[in-house]
Image (cartoon, rainbow, N blue to C red):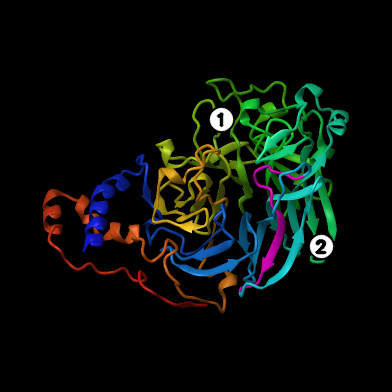
Amino acid sequence: MKRTLACGMAALLLAGLVATGFAYEAITGPTGVLYYDRDKAYQGYTLLDPTVGCKTTYLIDMRGNVVHTWKSEYTAGLHSVLLPNGHLLRAGALPRKKKPGYCGIGGAGGIIEEFDWQGNKVWEYKMFTPGKEIQHHTFCRLPNGNTMILGWETMSKKDAIKAGRDPAKIPEKPVMQKGIPHDQFWMDFVREVNREGDTVWEWHVKDHLGKGPNKLDFNYTLPAPMGATYPNLDWSHFNTVNYIPETDTVVLNSRNLSEFYLVDHKTGEIKYRWGNPSAWDPEAKAPGFWDDGDQKVFGSHCATPLENGHILLFDNGSERPEARRSRAVEVDPKTGEIVWQFATRHTNSFNSHRQGAVQRLDNGNTFITSTHGGHIFEVTPEGEVVWEFISPIFAGKTKCVVGNEDAFDSSLDAMTNMVHRAHRYGEDYPAFYGKTLTPQGYICGDDCPRFYSDYRKGAALSAAPAAQAQAAAPAPVEEEAGDGPAMLSY
């Protein structure tokens, strides 16, 4: 009885706020599925890896029920993808020591693992040699079965000066990050490997240093207050590798330079770049204290090629002078124009200072991961939110409500329920053929209120006064089909 009353009061207080279309500010709030428009959302299953202290990958249905899991011996480093054959391709974070030669930069992982549907490991590739190289952030399985892997490789300060780095922009003493001293550059590169683990192609930032539209300026640096290694030893900080088979093009993205790049797979040449002309063009206007200048995005992530030739991008907006807020943007490389975007009217609703991801769904909606709040949602082309979810897994523990105590002290605006990148797969995705997807309980835990369902039942409380009076008398509420246990077989 007490639980029912509490849920009813929550619906009464929050129903009007949800209906406004942009968010409210709160110190605490519910986790799990917050909103679901069955008619407008893309029906399917969501894959997510809780980033902090969790070794399990979850596949959930539209109502937040867990339908499948995979377990690794490593925490996420940082995300997974579900392959068409039903296998899970996952990055893991190998243990690191707090000593010179190890990498403490955010996003460092070290291993890519492939599991079958039953959870058996069928393939792995380690890129982890202290003082030499480490896999970080992401990977991409190619149509031919090869895997592209993003990595960092070391470069000594002496070699950096030879490569054109201004000695004044090199720290004299080791830089501490996550308790690890860093005294050499960590330079981005991409390695393509086959099933046997043989390297068949590589692309290195160090081979493309210089001036001009198809080079990377080694002396374009972020301001020192960006923190630790980011303005210096972790100079470019790539976070994306994707592939366009029709044109044999590799898609890369740099957070620090705030640009995405289209790279010719055959020649390695940078064919196109977009996001921050001040990183390479001396005529471009750099950002000022209150002025974005010619820079288009700030701290961007997840450059994703679309079938129409456009690029979908997560614009974090971190350190943006005019408005520090996040957006999803779609860019037409032919014109360089943003042709679509989504940003909330209230910055508190959708803002991930670091990380983040975007995915264009088959029905035209866009699936967005706002990492720092564990916030995952789906929007229509018109910008209407049709599915919304807050991850309930905080540093490996499930919680019904997120609170002030769940924020990191050392990372701006980050909660311990971070999700680097989630994916939505349609009900007809080949991975699900022949599989039985039975709800195994709510991802928040069965003791947690299901906010979406409780909100629906009490939604009439936000109607006109007469309707509110009528709703005051207890009445049975019909469950929507599928709210309870169900079995789907493909």
Amino acid at the residue labelled 2: Gly
| Res 331 → quadrant | top right
* Residue sitting at x 46%, y 64%: 43
Relative to residue 439, is residue 232 drawn left or right?
right
* Residue 219, above or below 482: above
Looking at marks 1 and 2 on the same chain, the residue that comes earlier in the sequence is marked by 2
The residue that mark 2 highlights is 197
Q: Nearer the viewer, residue 214 or 224?
A: 224
Relative to residue 40, is residue 292 drawn left or right?
right
Residue 158's disc is none
* Residue 1, above or below 129: below
* Residue sitting at x 62%, y 30%: 226
Q: Is residue 310 visible?
A: no
Q: Which residues are magenta?
A: 102-117
Residue 108 on the magenta segment = yes
Q: SS at mark 2?
A: loop
The residue that mark 1 highlights is 319
**Quarter of the N terminus within the rendering:** bottom left
* Residue sitting at x 16%, y 66%: 475
Amino acid at the residue labelled 1: Glu
Circle 1: is it few (<14), some (14-19), or many (20+) Cα within 10 Å? some
The answer for how far apart the CA atoms under marks 1 and 2 are is 40 Å
| Res 472 → quadrant | bottom left
Q: Which x, y percent locates residue 130? A: 79, 48
Relative to residue 383, is residue 476 drawn left or right?
left
| Res 481 → quadrant | bottom left
